[in-house]
Image (cartoon, helix red, strand yellow):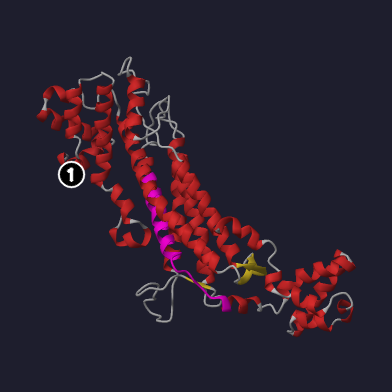
Amino acid sequence: MNDLFQTLFYDNRINELYTSEKSIQYLLDFEAHLAKAQAECQFIPSQFSEIIAHCCKVEKIDISQIAIQVGLGGNIAIPLVKQLTAVVKAENADASKFVHFGATSQDVIDTAMMLQSKEAIHLILPLLTQSIEQLKVLALAHQDTFLIGRSFMQQARPISFDYKVAIWIDSLQRAKQRLESLKYYIQLGGAVGTLASMPQKGIAIAQRMAANMGLEYHPISWHTQRDFVIEIAAALGILSGSLGKIAKDVSLLMQTEIAEVFEPAGKGKGGSSTMPHKRNPVSSISILSNAQRVPNLIATLLSAQIQDHERATGTWHAEWETLAQVVQLTAGSVRQMSILTNGLEVNPDKMLANLEITQGLIYAENLSFALAETLGKSEAHEMVEELCQEATAKQKHLKELVLENTKIRSFLSESHIQELFSPQNSIGFAHEMATHFIQ
């Protein structure tokens, strides 16, 4: 990762979990807990477990040497275990015989990956909750603010702004629920997953380890069944897409010609290198950029799901950096969304002005339904369609033509017509729908 883009695409709190030092510490945590669980199950002497745990500190490890040796070993666990064994041996030769006892490299790496993902998502969730709460405040403040609803980028009919924001909230709440429901599993199986190197005690050790580490126990090894990993990535990917949808809406609403919503202003935020008048949607840009990258990373994980026999060649290895990138990019988007939603500026006057761009054509459906009660649907639709064409050709407001039409006036009073051309009478159950998500 290039540090130059740290504040644009990422969340530094999450990236700190993926530094070399922190990543190795997760691996060492596995080794410490393995020895602890084995001692608790009377599989190894407890005094050796304590020595091993004491040595499982990243400051005792030469990370530069591991970086050199990982290319020869094929994964990070192999040189790490070798170095850890040497560290323990310097403390106690007998204890060193029980380092990594009965486990395999994938057990270490998979469990560390779960610990890392769990801690990252634990940090992501409060910031996601903050964005949801900020959107609720925004929606409550604009229950009586109306804007045009757009279909295929064209003006359709009015909606309320609380309705639009409630749709954003709904998607983020579901994404939050997915993250909260995720489970993180321990991996402990040994060479081919059967715990054959821990006779009589293997399952008990795995269960004890899971309990001690705050992870889930699964009754069979998942070395080459990778849905646990993909489930984490998919939940993050859906969140990334939901954030991207909000960012897309905001960036479109910020267009000069629209000017209905603006990202929060700040000194130095959103400026152009050449045009002083510009106000760029910086947070939206960051979120949208990340949302472009995450799906392809998840595609890599899905492709890597097809693994060979009991231990995979290459496909498992493809997960390591890929999952980390999914976590880091999604975390960055969540951070940017918390900024975007903290003081999002709304321009109700411009929203009302934009409602009049079509000179009343957006209320044609209201008029058609009102006339249909007397004329029937087909005749009413045909009459209103002709009036819309006339209004366009003459550059006149549709309401003006309706008020001049004697046939329509014989069915509809002037006050009724005024109501049909009012945004607050055109939003259906928007408020009722929004209430479920903003109260």
Q: Residues within 10 Å of mark 1 (few under 14, many from 20)?
A: few
Measuring from the top left, give residue 106's x and y in whole percent.
33, 31
Measuring from the top left, give residue 161's x and y in whole percent.
58, 67
Disc 1 is placed on an element classified as: helix
Range of magenta residues: 322-349
- The residue that mark 1 highlights is 64
Residue 132 appears left or right of 404: left
In front: 325, or 353?
353
Q: Is residue 58 above or below residue 148?
A: above
Measuring from the top left, give residue 239's x and y in whole percent.
48, 51
Q: Is residue 13 above or below residue 300?
A: below
Residue 189 visible in the shown view: no
Residue placed furthest toward the front: 439
Location of the N terminus (image quadrant)? bottom left
Q: Is residue 284 above or below residue 383?
A: above
Residue 355 appears left or right of 378: left
Measuring from the top left, give residue 9's x and y in whole percent.
37, 59
Query: What residue appears at the point 71 percent right and 74 percent down from the top-left corner?
Result: 422
